[in-house]
Structures are given as structure tokens and as C-alpha cells.
Image (tube, grey):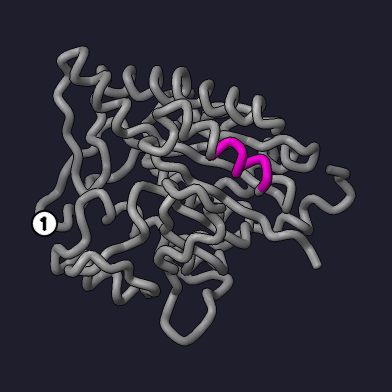
Amino acid sequence: MAARTTILKLGGELIERPDDRQRLARQIVRLAADGPLVVVHGGGRTIDAELAIRGIPRRTVDGLRVTDGPTLDVVVSVLAGLLNTQLVAAVSAAGGRGVGLTGADALIGLVRPAPPHQAATGGTVDLGLVGAPLDAGAPELLLDLVARGYVPIVASLGASADGELYNVNADTWAAHLAAALGADRLMVAGGTPGVLDAQGATIDLLDRDDIERLVRSGEASAGMVAKLDACRRAATAGVADVRIVDGRGPGPITESRGTRIVAAHGRPNPEQTTDDAPAGPRWHERLSGHPR
């Protein structure tokens, strides 16, 4: 039986402190030993802190950062510079073979400018220098690295075909990669135990209709809206196991139940739909013949 292949998205709040990075680095090494793994990370709180230091206003809508030129400079310096390098170093210290990347490397994160965003509260917002991932097939660089036993650790930045850099929401980027690579599992780890109901309890299972209801009613927090939309897209593109989980605990992230996202209640996630990019070839097919 082929090993399960995983995209692990880490919220920036999980990798700010050295102790947390070391704990997660050990988990990443164990997870990579069990099967192909790509890690995607954000860095929202660290970006916010740096914006404040520089006196640059912060603006977000539905969990998406409105990005102008000065904001993008901060995003690039924090994600591609500070946080990515720190996480790669922690994985290496834990015995792993981490490789730090952004979407600009070999254009694994090919994007176009994101269209105006229809806010959950109504109205249209220009997101500025935010990229929407393009369906360009499975990123060969990631396949090559994983086939040789490396763990790609990817900061959530993209690049256009003409070489312009763009901010990319980390949840959106992770979900896109999960579909493009035909991953078996997408784990979106953050600072909550999943999606919470009005009483603060974790919701075990959500399908696309449930997600639409949560967003329309305003029950989903602004930061959760982008996560839910990204997970919905991954599920409808054929990723079988999509979960929003708590990344703060001492136990393995993969054992956290969290909230599972499915295409529809009562049936498995389909291989593809007409409104989302199809899942790519399964990794065990792409990696056959490549020793790890």
C-alpha cells in the first residue's frame, strides 16, 4: 500500500517562538518519514508586528490581506526571509532535510493578480498585490525534491509569468498545491481546535453547503472564511482527507481530529468537479522509480 501523501499548512502563529518551531520541526521529520510531505507556512502576526513598526496600515478582508507595495515588501522579508529560514533551520536541527522555497522558485507558485474580492459582508474589495494560483500542473521541483528525500518548506508567495512577486494567502496556496499534486491529505494547522460553533465546541464535519451557511450567517470569523473556502476547493478537487486542526498540542498533528471538510455529507470527496481544478496524478504514481 502506498504511503499517504500530505500537504501540511502551518499558521504563522505556530512558528513564531523557538520552542514551538522545535516541537513542530520534530513532527515534520516524523511525518516526512511516513510519506511524501510538503509544508506551507504563513506568518500573519509577525507581518502585522513588522507593519506596525514601520508605520504601515494593516488591512484585511475575510482573512485576506489587502497588499500594496510597502506591505508586500514586509510580507516578502518576513515570509521568505525570517520565518522560512528559521523553520528550515529547526527542521534540519531535528534531523530532517528541509529546503526553503517560495512560489518564485522554478515558478512553482505561478499566479495571476487576484480579481476583486466579493466580501462576505457585501461589497467588492481590490486586494492589490495578491496572487491567485494558476493551474500549471504539478510543480516538478516539489516532486523532484520529495523523490530525493527532501522536505520542501514553502513560504506563501507567488510570482507571475513576467516575474512580479505577489502575496498569496497561505491556506489558498496549500489547498491549491494539495489539488495540483494529487495529495491524499491536507492538514491546515492553526491556533484553534478546528471550526467552532456558537458555543465554542468543535464542529466535526462540514460540507460545502454548511460552509456557505456559516459564511452567509457571519458565524465564521473573518480569519476562518479564507480557510473554509480553501478547504472546500481542495475537497471538491479530490483531496480525500481535508482537516482544519489544532497545531498547538504536544501530540502529532495528524492525530488531531479537528474539523473535517468534505464535498458533501454521506459521500467521499470526488476526483474533480467542473468549477475547481482537477487533482493531479497521485504522488505514488509520479514518484515511482525515484528512490527516496
Residue 170, x across and y down, in percent: 41, 42
Quarter of the picture containing the C terminus is top right
Residue 263, x across and y down, in percent: 44, 74
Observer-nearest residue: 270 or 58?
A: 58
Residue positioned 10% across, 52% down in the render: 123
Name above or below for residue 158 compared with residue 5: above
Give, as a three-letter code, the residue at label 1: Thr
Residue 211 as seen in the image, left or right of residue 136 = left
Name above or below for residue 217 compared with residue 36: below
Seen from this angle, which residue lies furthest top? 54
Q: Residues within 10 Å of mark 1 (few under 14, many from 20)?
A: few
Seen from this angle, which residue lies furthest left? 122
Seen from this angle, which residue lies furthest bottom? 266
Residue 129, x across and y down, in percent: 30, 30
Residue positioned 50% across, 31% down in the render: 161
Residue 88 falls inside the magenta stretch = no
Residue 59, x across and y down, in percent: 17, 34
Q: Which residues are magenta?
A: 24-30
Observer-nearest residue: 150 or 108?
A: 150
